Amino acid sequence: MGRGRAGRTRFTELRRLVPAITPKVLAQRLRQMERDGLVGRTYHAEMPPRVEYEITPLARTLLPVFHTLVDWSDTHLGEVERARERYDAAP
Amino acid sequence: MGRGRAGRTRFTELRRLVPAITPKVLAQRLRQMERDGLVGRTYHAEMPPRVEYEITPLARTLLPVFHTLVDWSDTHLGEVERARERYDAAP
């Protein structure tokens, strides 16, 4: 989310970055994260109006949690995939 | 989940531990975690049949991720709650 000007990103750019999520779900998640103080929303009263999103300092404190999760998945995702294959193949 | 005999727990005990989850959703999540290799399921062909669940060694490797998340929430959950109050109070 920190890719645009001054770390701000527009909805359409977020949609492009996360194609698997529908616009409706993405809008819901952004509102939830805004409510939780993890995303900042800036409304520009222009024609047409423009909205930008950015992660907040509070969200940046979550980075160590994400790093721990990424490290775990780098190490163990293969085991999860093999477990899924075994489960799916079971009678 | 490691509370019963040899770390095994029955569905009814899990339901008691997590009252907010419906039986249907709990059963789904257990099946997903079993498929992912995070939960082991033991079926006892008795009358009536008995099923027990236990976390796997692979699941135990996730403990550091949970500890990081618990530490984060101990430190920052208050900020999230205040952000929610501000968001809900906004016009």
Image (cartoon, coloured by chain):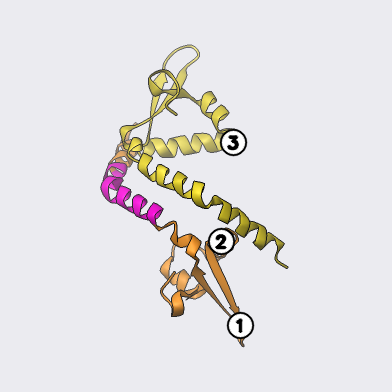
Chain colours: A yellow, B orange
Above or below, B44 relative to A34: below
Where does the image place residue A2, in percent across and percent down from the top left?
Answer: 42, 26
Left or right, residue A25 beside residue B13 = right
Report the span colored magenta. Answer: B64-81
- Residue marked by disc 2: B37
- Spatial CA span between label 3 and label 2: 29 Å
- Image quadrant where one finds the C terminus of chain A: bottom right
Asked if residue A10 can be seen in this view, the reply is yes
The amino acid type, in three-letter code, at marker 3 is Thr
The secondary structure that most of the magenta stretch takes on is helix
Above or below, A46 relative to A77: above
Tell us which disc is closer to us: 3 or 2: 2
SS label for mark 3 = loop
> How many C-alpha atoms fall within 10 Å of the one at disc 1: few (<14), some, or many (≥20)?
few
Tell me what residue is drawn at x 41 percent, y 42 percent. Answer: A67
Mark before the other along the chain sequence, 1 or 2: 2
Q: Which of B70 and A68 is in front in this view?
A: A68
